Amino acid sequence: MLRYRLEGSGPPLLLIHGWGVTFAIWQNLAPLLKSRFQLIMIELPGLGGSPHVAADEPYYQICAEAIEEVRQFLGIEHWAMLAYSSGTRAAEAYVKRYPQSVTHAIFLCPTYILEIWALFLRLLDGPHPPTLMQWVFSDWRLHSLVRALGFNWQQHQYTRVWKKEIELQPIDILIRSLCEMPGQGRTPFYVPSIPTLFIWGGRDALIARPRHLGPHDVVIPANHSAPMLAAPYVAEVVLPFLTEGRIVNVSTPRSRRPRRPLRLEAGQGKLRPFEHRRWLNRQGKKTAPGRFTLRRQASLQTSGSQRQRRGTHASWRRPTD
C-alpha cells in the first residue's frame, strides 16, 4: 500500500504531490489547511516510501487503484482531493474511475504543458540506454531543469532540495510519470460532474494556461512552485471552495511605482510645472495663475543676467557721439 501521513482534524482531504517529489512538498501549505481538514498526504507508486510497480501496467491506472486502496484502508466514505503538477493526472485517473468517492477536486498547476515541453517528452519517450537517462536527470542538468521549470530560472534554496529529492527516485518511474501522461501532457482534462477547481500560476513557465478562463479557473501570482512559495495564495482559494463551494480570486496587492521625490529646497530648481501643481494640490493649496516653477524662475534669472551682461558689454563698444 502507498505510504501516507495524517495531519489535522476535520473532513478528509487527500493531497497528491507532483513529479519526482514526495509529500514533503506540502510542508508550507499543510499548516494552513490542517486546522479545518484531516490531511491524507500520500506518495505515489514507486516514489518516496511507496512500493515499486510493474512496468507492464499503465502508470496512472496503477495510481488510481493504489489511491482507492488507501481510502478503503482508512475507512473513508468520501473525501476531497487537492493534486499538484503531474499528480493532477493521477487525480484525474482516480476521479474518472471512482467519481462517487470524491466530493471536490482541486487541480493546482495542472499539467497541461506548453508545446515545447511536449516535444521534450516525445524525445524522451524512446529506447534510450539507462546510463543516458541517469546522465540527463543528474548533477547540473537536473538542477537546471528544476530551476527553469519550477522557479522560472530564479535561484532559491528549494531548488537544491527538490533536486536532491528527485535524484533519490527511480529513473524508470520518473520517465513513466512524464511520458504516460494523456497525450504526453497535451490532452485537456476531463472530470466528471463534481465540483472542480483549477488553480493556475500566473508566472508558470511549464503550463499552458487557458487564454479564456472559465468559471472554474483561478489564477494566482505564482510560478510552478506554488505549494512552496505561494502557499498563502493557494489556501486563500482552496478554503472557500472546500468549505462554502465559493470560487474566489486572490487579493493581490498592487505594486505602485515609487514617485520621484520633490525637491523644494531653494536654489535647486528641479521641479517641472506639472509636478509643482500636483504637489500643491496634495498640500491643499491652489495654484496661482501665472505662477512660475523653480526651474522657470532660475532660467529667467539666468537669462536676465545674461541679457544685462550682453547689454553692458555692447555699451562699451558703442561709439560715442
Image: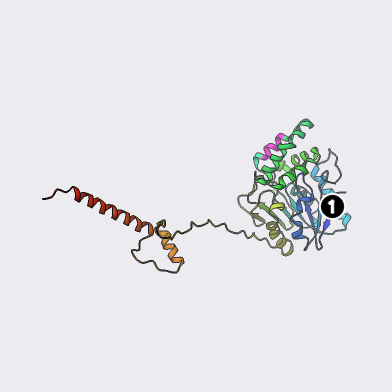
Q: Horizontal and vertical percent for residue 227?
A: 72, 52
Structural crowding at the residue carrying mark 1, measured as other residues with C-alpha within 10 Å and reported as few (<14), some (14–19) or many (≥20) = some
Can you say whether 250 is above or below 88 in the image? below
SS under mark 1: strand
Can you say whether 49 is above or below 138 in the image? below
Residue at (40, 68) in percent of width and height: 286
Along the viewing direction, whichever of 263 and 314 lies nearer the viewer: 314
Q: Is residue 52 magenta?
A: no
Quadrant of residue 168 in the image? top right
> Magenta span: helix, strand or loop, mainly?
helix
Quadrant of residue 300 in the image? bottom left
Residue at (81, 39) in percent of width and height: 170
Q: Horizontal and vertical percent for residue 260?
A: 48, 56
Boundaries of the magenta span? 117-123
* Residue 96 seen in render: no
In this rendering, position of residue 257 left or right of residue 156: left
Give the amino acid type for the residue marked by disc 1 in the picture: Tyr
In this rendering, position of residue 288 left or right of residue 110: left
Q: Horizontal and vertical percent for residue 194?
A: 74, 57
Question: Which residue position holds label 1?
Answer: 4
